[in-house]
Amino acid sequence: MEISTGLNTRALSAFGISADHDDLPADSAAATRLLADQAGTESKHVQLIQSDLAAFIARKPDRRFTGLLKSMKEERVVHELETLPKTMHKNLSGQAIASAEFWSDTLDRWAEELVAATTGPP
């Protein structure tokens, strides 16, 4: 949600302006670059989580964790998060905001499922 909020507040002055347009406000472009870097870092974090979950399942198979990992792979979360900075660099703020909010909600839901899987019966 930090990325979505950042785009909404710090890059708003560039909304609807082509990324290659001369009138693109410098402060918005700089904010977008920083937020795109943050989005790239977050995709790497999710990739590590997915990798760790796969390694855990390999050691201790459990259908609750297997289902969660399957969802992450089917949704192609890492790939989709990797495309977010590219969308941001094109100054497609509306699309980037919607994508960031969608993945924020999805990752939050998966986190709740992960917590529930660790506390519930096997």
Image: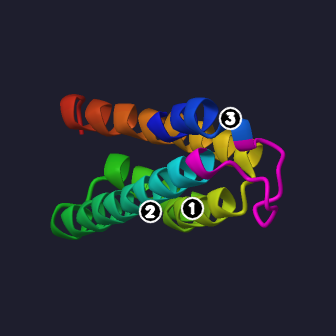
Helix or strand or loop: what does disc 3 sit on? Answer: helix
Q: Which residue is mark 1?
A: 85
Q: Earlier in the sequence, mark 2 or mark 1?
A: 2
User: Where's residue 95, x and y in %?
Assistant: 74, 47
Tag 2–tag 1 contact (CB < 8 Å):
yes
Magenta residues, start to end: 14-27
**Quarter of the C terminus within the rendering:** top left
Calculate the distance from the C-alpha at mark 2 to the C-alpha at mark 1. 6 Å
> How far apart are the two marked residues, 3 and 1, measured between alpha carbons?
16 Å
* Residue placed under numbered mark 2 in the picture: 40
Q: In the rendered structure, which amino acid carries the disc numbered 1?
A: Pro
In three-dimensional space, the C-alpha distance between marks 3 and 2, rounded to whole angstroms, equals 21 Å
Label annotation for residue 17: none
Question: Relative to 17, is 120 above or below?
Answer: above
* Residue 28 shown in magenta: no
Secondary structure that dominates the magenta span: loop
Q: Which residue is mark 3?
A: 12
